[in-house]
Image (cartoon, rainbow, N blue to C red):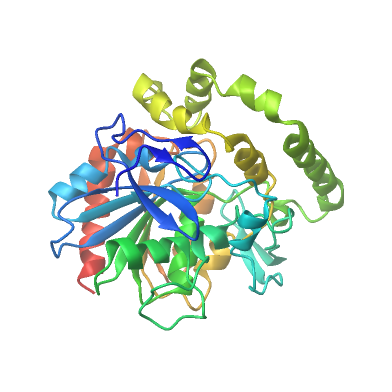
Amino acid sequence: MLAATVASLGVTMPPVSPTGLQNRIWRWRGFDVRYQCLGDERADGPAVLFVHGLFVNADHWRRNLPALADAGCRCYAIDLLGYGYSSKPNPLSEAAKAVSGENGRSLSAPVADLGTAGGGTREGVEVELAHPVAGSPYNFYTWSDLSEQLLDFEAEERSEQLLDFEAEVIGGDEPVTLVANSIGSISALQAAIDAPARINGVAIVNPNFRELHVSEQPALLRPLLVPIIEAVQRTLRERGQPLFDALAKPATVQQILKEPYFDADMVADELVDVLLTPLLQPGSADVVFDTLSYSAGPLPEQQLADTRLEAPVLVLYGEQDPWTPPARVRALERFAAVQRVVPLPGVGHCPHDEAPGTVNPLVLDFVRACAAR
């Protein structure tokens, strides 16, 4: 269904993205979720669902959907709740709290062996899972585990936004391959953990290890660092609007993007437009600061060690990424689920956008192999 307005919260969405792809709306649990699709939806080619990273949206995959669709895949990209042109309910509203994926889920902190920037291991670290803002829906379990709708497989009486989308929009009997960038990889891995029958593979493009997570802080310094971080987060939530207004400008966003992009020439006006315009929609500031306050939730090494994870995992990473320690990424090879860790020279945190000619063939080969399993 096409729509010009996400009426529930006054979010204005163009029928066609500046990238040339049609925007569609999926009504989910009382909220609207923007998505795009490319490829013959009636064909039997492999289905691929692209999951974006922090503060971006489906348009970030504009260089990838066409290539995989031309190769015969049914390609979908989604704006997770709170992002892009999807609904942005206030995190403290009752409607938002009602769909939090943390509801009814055990959030006791598991113990995991986490990585270090140098590729080593920190053994036996408790991973704090619960969002510090009680009831907030902006967590990986919401973007993963949100509803009990229309899934044709037996799960733990729950499913997730990604899985609901797969069941209701993509449909069909064949599993889907997830392709995710940055923190989107955590939502994708959680989907594969919660519903192994529906996900046949996860391709991760530059994982994010969430350095502000409380479990990522050095144990000896945690009593000092955590209160400081929490105080800053609380201030941003309560008084951050002027800062948001000052930063949400094209020149500022362009400058910020030049840090994760190794090739500064790739940070063109179109990229700034498709990433910034949705951030100017009502409710965005609340989502941004709530997400920055999310110093908990699952972490990649903990997820990759989960025995429920049956899907193969491909990890691609840009060697010039200033945010993701390359040695820690390479160390993910120790997990049985990880088939390959592939370094990509000369690109940063978003190789799918910086070097699609390199990334697309690798993802396509992985998708085809997963579909043939």
- Taking the image as shown, residue 337 lies to the left or right of residue 215, namely left
Q: Residue at x 86, y 46 (%)?
A: 224
Q: Residue furthest bottom?
A: 154
- Taking the image as shown, residue 141 lies to the left or right of residue 3, namely right
205 or 13, which lies in front? 13
Return the x and y of residue 133 as percentages of the image width and height. 73, 53
Return the x and y of residue 270 as percentages of the image width and height. 35, 24
Q: Residue furthest top?
A: 251
Return the x and y of residue 160 as percentages of the image width and height. 48, 66
311 lies above or below 215: below
Number of marks drawn = 0
Return the x and y of residue 147 as percentages of the image width and height. 50, 68
Q: Residue at x 79, y 45 (%)?
A: 230
Residue 331: tell me if it is visible: no
In the figure, residue 288 lies in which quadrant? top right
370 lies above or below 329: below
- Taking the image as shown, residue 348 lies to the left or right of residue 282, namely left
116 lies above or below 65: below
Residue 34: tell me if it is visible: yes
In the figure, residue 105 lies in which quadrant? bottom right
Q: Quadrant of the C terminus?
A: bottom left
In the figure, residue 271 lies in which quadrant? top left
- Taking the image as shown, residue 120 lies to the left or right of residue 27, namely right
81 or 89, which lies in front? 89
